[in-house]
Image: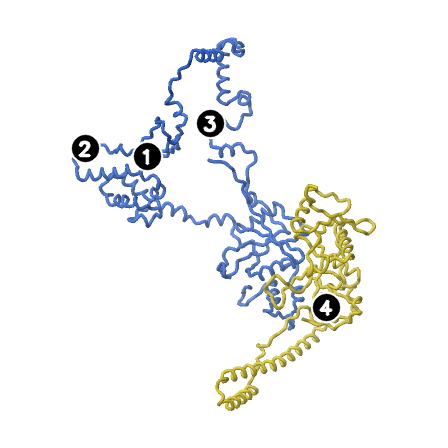
Chain colours: A blue, B yellow
Amino acid sequence: MGFSENGKQYLLPEEALYLMECGNVQVFYRDLPLSIQDGYERFLSSATVSLQQYQVFGHLKRLGYVVHRFDPSSEPSSYARQLNLPQSRDRAGRQLKRKRSPSPTATCSYTEAPVEPTVEKMEEDKCSLEGDHVKKLAASPDIQTATTSGSDEGRSWWTTDDLGASDKELHHSPTSRSSRWDFSSIPFPDVGSSERHPSCLAPPEPSLLPGDLTVGVCDIASWRRKINLRMVKMSSKEQKREEDKRRRRWDVNKDREVRRCRNWAEYHELLARRQRKRKGRPAHLWNREVTPLHDPRQPIPTGELLDKISVIKSTHLLEGASRLKGSEEWRICFNVYQPDTVADFKKSNPGKPYSRMCVCSFDGPVPDLRVIKLLAFQSGDIPVVFAVVDHGDISFYTFKDFQLPTDVFP
Amino acid sequence: MEESPSMDDHQDSSLVVGVGLCDSAPLLWRLQDLKTVRSLGLVGALLGSLPRTPRQNQRLGRPLLLLPEEEKLLRDEEAAGALPGQNQDVGGVELQRRFEEDQQRSFEEQSVLALEDRKSALLRAMTSSHTGSESGAEAVDEALRRRLEALDHSFTFPQSAMAVQLSTARAGLSYCPEARAHLQANWPIREQNSPRSDARCQVFRDLRGRGFFLTSAGKFGGDFLVYPGDPLRFHAHFIAVCLMLDESVCLLDVLAVARLGSNVKKTVLLCSPTADGGVHYTSLQWSGMV
């Protein structure tokens, strides 16, 4: 409570009045002590702290919070806050990737026991192995051990092979480079077998792919349907039915639209039109000035498609808030800090407040979006609580930003 | 607690309540005023810290804030007047002298009490430490007497140890009916002349006349909470929402307030003042299918 200036201790009027009510402080004016009534009438006014604001102040102080006046000029602007953001997170991540420590457990906490000995062995044999492979292995053991816990088997044929190769190189140097692949341990998916297999192939190891190529899972369901077909022996009646169907469908001359074509050019056009329609580009939509937003022939994930065709863009609370000018009636009055037992609060370094209070009353208007945006912008990242005073009762309301969830699987 | 010169009960009707204005809000400060106002059936709201237990929010103390309708009622019945403001230095020097006299008197009383307190503490300490031994009883008495005598001579009660009292209401106010005319002349006219506030006043007056006690109901979405008796003894029965007879209300608002009422187990009353001075009441009840 209070502040010191010019070597003297001062109390703000609301603080003095609160301490008077608690019986801790006696205020003298013209050598006479002020009564509580004097305190109320002298200290509270619309110019300093109004009665409603004092009610909220007293309520919070009695609950144990530390309440200070809010000074909008002392808050850092959003730009300043942006500049002060620590970049430590990225740096730590990169360090994690490049660090070569002798014990993998020190850098990465997901190390698993079976992989450990191989990693250590790799480190020891660093000097004898070929340059590129070594760097890749040693550089990314941490990530790999972190992420590929399940594909240990997939790793093993390659890493052990390298060690095997290195050993061979060490000991039998003149021997020509034999095949380095252990085919018995490379899994070749048996797509054609009739037994149950998953209908997609796992993506290949990203380290084996060139450059920035990323390959997803491969869906082989459609191919599996085309293999293992056996010849169906149809009776003569069925054969004839099949032929009739084909004939009926494929009698080009009976097609009315074909008859309307007067030359080959028109016929080609008709064929092209039908092709386009089948493929999802009907002419009446695509041959005009205004075309659909998205060509159905282009593959696109559902989330992006929803974004592309959305008419209303979702916005967040602080959008456009910096342009708003302050208003006289609505302003943040107090910073509220949690009591000392929960957070450490020092007058010289209060830290971030728990919330900020704006005092209003039930007789007045409900804050509209403009006011909420303005106050949220002034407050920064700390929630603004509206303390609504109603003849002795105080209710606290706060507005939270909310994003509607999009129910889309990527 | 400040005790004002007592008035007899049969002079209740001539009691005038002194209302202080703080930030344009009507506040009652004196204990007798609070009792008077409660006897008239007006509840108000306490705002200040309770002197004995200041750091809690369950029970608050003086001042009492009046609803604008309550204030208007008091004024119309000529039962309230404005207290003299702070700028009126009613005998400043006189007050100072009186204050110093009071302080001196209090100091003397307290030093006597403090001495007695020390003596009794000494007595307790001496006798409790020697309860076991009976042979030294006489020696104990002798030592005790000597100690008490020394205390009488050498005891000093420092000024800084004195307990001071902070008065809630302003000191130096006389409470007599002659001041009534003077007080009323000073009453600032703070009427809100809107049809809505007139409607509220009329509804308030009518319900008060029927014996109900009313408090503010902002957090229940209405205008008043209606109690069948003193709020300390009953729960509220109704939420009163004041509307003009010809005012059109959005159906969603009616549904919202009906829902709210059923959730908090109170009946919603739609109150509209009629032209002849009465009030028309409609209650909303959320019933099932039939």
Whether residue B185 appears in this view of the structure is: no
Q: What residue type is labelled 4?
A: Gln
Q: What residue type is labelled 3?
A: Gln
Within-10-Å neighbours for mark 4: few <14, some 14–19, many 20+: many
Provide the residue designation for mark 1. Answer: A208
Which chain contains the residue that carries disc 3?
A
Quadrant that contains the N terminus of chain A: bottom right
Give me the residue at 59% from left, 47% from top: A372
Provide the residue designation for mark 2. Answer: A176
Q: Is mark 1 on a helix, strand or loop?
A: helix
Q: Is disc 1 in the same subunit as disc 2?
A: yes
Q: In which quarter of the image is residue B120?
A: bottom right
Q: Is mark 4 on a helix, strand or loop?
A: helix
In the picture provided, is B268 more to the left or to the right than A248? right
Q: In which quarter of the image is residue A177?
A: top left
Which chain contains the residue that carries disc 4?
B
Provide the residue designation for mark 3. Answer: A298
